[in-house]
Amino acid sequence: MTNVKATNITWHEGNLKRTERWDALKCTGATLWFTGLSASGKSTIASALEQVLVQMGVNCYRLDGDNVRHGLNKNLGFSAEDRAENIRRIGEVARLFADGGAVTLTSFISPYRADRDLCRELHGNDGLGFFEVFVDTPIEVCEQRDPKGLYKKARAGEITGFTGIDDPYEAPNTPELVLETANKSVDECVQECVNFLRERGVFRG
Ligand code: ADP
């Protein structure tokens, strides 16, 4: 699906520079890419972090796996090819949000290293910060949590191609941040993210 079909198109450079936008809006765009098994805690942490950041006055927007599959990516399933396209589109959307000045939080299993690396590259080529957050929760813990009952269904054979059960999860080799959620509260994980963003200079003022 990533075949280039559009021809005779030319990039139109706008008048407004990114730095002009960011300075005027007092924001710094970047993407925090959460990856991990289903039920590892990506959505819970990203959602709590979004609230904390916005309350602090940080321009922040969250793209959530299931939510995006309701709209933009509703025509994609869970084959390796569709998963790749799902992540590629999210990578492009995150890049646009980051360019617009938002601290963009993405919470997708994004199980394949190559797909995440592509998103990193998309940001890097555009001079935008991309930080991979590995939500490192052992599968036993995820399966015990099972908030949506998906592991139960996967074990019963009602769902196939389920990450961690009969589909692989490739953990990041060098994530910028690792959150070990098994023995930490959601608030502690959120605080680690806030500290990390501060260290990386993503906050202003
Ligand atoms: P994912 O988005 O990775 O599929 P969810 O956020 O939907 O995962 O579910 C994670 C579950 O784990 C939630 O029920 C949440 O309350 C629970 N949980 C327990 N401890 C933590 C923690 N430290 N961080 C995130 N979630 C946690």
Image (cartoon, grey):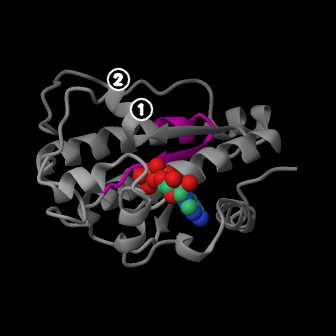
Note whether residue 126 is visible. Answer: no
The residue under label 1 is which amino acid type?
A: Asn
Q: Can you identify the residue that label 2 sits on?
A: 71
Q: Position of residue 77 (x, y in %)?
A: 17, 37
In this image, 1 relative to 54: left or right?
Answer: left
Q: Position of residue 153 (x, y in %)?
A: 22, 50
Real-space Cα separation, disc 2 to disc 1, in angstroms: 7 Å
Vertical arrangement, residue 169 with respect to residue 128, above or below: below
Residue 157 versus residue 203: which sits nearer the camera?
Answer: 157
Q: Is residue 148 magenta?
A: no
Q: Are marks 2 and 1 in contact (CB under 8 Å)?
A: yes
| Ligand 1 within 8 Å, label 2 CB | no
In this image, 26 relative to 163: left or right?
Answer: right
Residue for point 40% across, 65% down = 144
Q: Secondary structure at mark 2?
A: loop
Vertical arrangement, residue 41 with respect to residue 100, above or below: below
| Ligand 1 within 8 Å, label 1 CB | no
The quarter in which the N terminus is drawn is: top left
Task: Provide the residue span drawn in magenta.
Answer: 95-110
Residue 41 versus residue 90: which sits nearer the camera?
Answer: 41
Residue 109 versus residue 92: which sits nearer the camera?
Answer: 109
| Count of marks overlaid on the render | 2
Q: Can you identify the residue that label 1 sits on?
A: 67
Note whether residue 122 is visible. Answer: yes
Q: Is residue 109 magenta?
A: yes
Callout 1: few (<14), some (14-19), or many (20+) C-alpha neighbours within 10 Å? few
Q: Position of residue 64 (x, y in %)?
A: 45, 40
The residue under label 2 is which amino acid type?
A: Gly
Vertical arrangement, residue 105 with respect to residue 70, above or below: below
Q: Quadrant of residue 3?
A: top left
